Image (cartoon, rainbow, N blue to C red):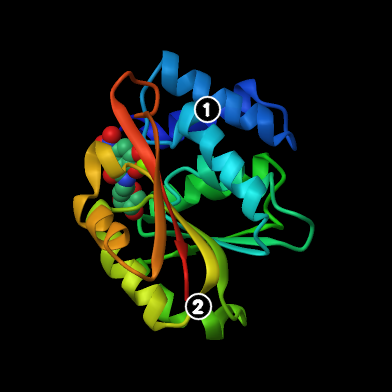
Amino acid sequence: TGSSRPQRMLKAVQKNATKGDPQSVISAIDYYCRHKEWAMNVGDEKGLILDSVLTEVNPSMALELGTYCGYSSVRIARLLSPNSKLITVEFNPAFAAIARQIIAYAGLQDKVTIVEGPSADLIPKMKERFGLKSFDFVFLDHWKDRYVPDTKLLEECGLLKKGTVLLADNVICPGAPEYLKYVRNNPRYESRYYKSYLEYTKAEDGLEKSVFLG
Ligand SMILES: O=C(NC/C=C/[C@H]1OC[C@H](O)[C@@H]1O)c1cc([N+](=O)[O-])cc(O)c1O
Ligand SMILES: [Mg+2]
């Protein structure tokens, strides 16, 4: 049978990007997905907002829920300080396999740990498995109906600390209405919306940044 969209994305990276150069990997994926075949990467426009929030937070320990092909893993990991780490959770093994190769092509494999499986099962095991106390930054980009339950789980597992920043993709399109209600009417979060566009399209979408107040 034919190739998959993630496999074609990896091919585009191998063909058009420079090994060890994260920016060229990002540009190759954005070019492919804008001109050849759309894919659900956070993309270049929302990616600039992700970059600016990351630069502001400068996290030591970052978590990403929803790796897909690793585009945002590369965007995040390329901006991390030395010794800072990204843990990224992906449910779909085929996606995880492609992401591993794209992250390695960018030369960021030492900063990124991909964990395969359902976020609901993996989050409660994070402290013991990675010897970490809490996350400074969380990027939510997985199934939109998992944003609220997984945020509550992160709270319950003591994985958020005062000042932890949650950044959620797709709060408008496809939409995460329950999540917006949860973080916006919650005294434990200070939330704001960054208006942008759905990746590679003219449709509205945006990122919600929510600071956990402890
Ligand atoms: O479903 C989306 N993301 C969640 C992905 C879910 C699937 O990929 C990761 C997970 O293992 C699952 O198999 C999504 C969808 C659109 N979209 O326009 O449909 C745009 C986006 O940025 C998105 O993150
Ligand atoms: Mg998304």
Left or right of 139 on screen, residue 81:
right
Which amino acid type corresponds to the residue marked 2 in the rendered image?
Met
Q: Secondary structure at mark 1?
A: helix
At 59% from the left edge and 31% from the top edge, which residue is drawn?
A: 26
Compared to residue 159, the image places residue 60 above or below, namely: above
Residue 126's label in the rendered image is: 2
Measured as percent of width and height from the top left, residue 174 is found at: 23, 39
Compared to residue 28, the image places residue 177 above or below, namely: below
At 32% from the left edge and 73% from the top edge, which residue is drawn?
A: 152
Q: Residue furthest top?
A: 35
At 26% from the left edge and 36% from the top edge, which residue is drawn?
A: 173
Left or right of 104 on screen, residue 46:
left
Of mark 1 and mark 2, the one earlier in the sequence is 1
Which amino acid type corresponds to the residue marked 1 in the rendered image?
Ile
Q: Residue furthest front?
A: 187
Measured as percent of width and height from the top left, residue 45 is found at: 48, 27
Which residue does the numbered mark 1 point to in the structure image?
29
Residue 3's label in the rendered image is: none
Compared to residue 14, the image places residue 165 above or below, namely: below
Q: Residue furthest bottom?
A: 128
